[in-house]
Image (spheres, rainbow, N blue to C red):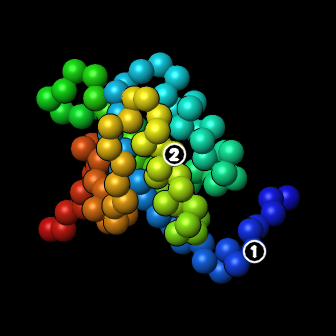
Amino acid sequence: MLREKKGDRHEHEERTFAVRVNGVPGLLARVEALFRRQRVPLRTVFFEKELGTRDRVRLTIVVKTSEETFVLLGRQLLRLHDVSHVAEVHPAAVVPSFALQERTA
């Protein structure tokens, strides 16, 4: 059973990272290990090649955590060698390129 930090019990919210990285072998393993060390479960990980680039990919990571831990994880993501940009995005703003859109008649 995971222990919660004092004061964090009711502060957890679903938050979304948008991360730009170089597509290199082992990248997802390093990202997953970073979140595991902070005891933050990954709710969603979406990995997509950026259009018009050779080796750049976009990671969208959804976690449920406190604001303090979210900021810490953002800093730690930026310290990874292949990460060039980390930002928080609103979940509704994330639309994968292959997403199906509902149409009405």
Tag 2 secondary structure: helix
Q: Position of residue 102 (x, y in %)?
A: 25, 61
**In this picture, residue 33 sits left or right of residue 88:** right
Q: Give the class, few, some or many, for how many residues have Cα within 10 Å of label 2's Cα (few <14, many ≥20).
A: some
Residue, disc 1: 6
The residue positioned 60% from the left and 46% from the top of the image is: 35
Percent x, y of residue 7:
70, 78
Q: Amino acid at mark 2?
A: Gln
Q: Residue at x 52, y 23 (%)?
A: 26
Mark 2 = which residue?
A: 76
Q: To which quarter of the image does residue 105 belong?
A: bottom left
Residue 44 picture location, percent across and down: 50, 50
Residue 20 vs 23, above or below: the answer is below
Q: Quadrant of residue 64?
A: bottom right
Residue type highlighted by circle 1: Lys
The residue nearer to you, when weighing 99 against 29, is: 29
Q: Name the foreground residue: 47 vs 11.
A: 11
Q: In which image quadrant can residue 91 be found? A: bottom left
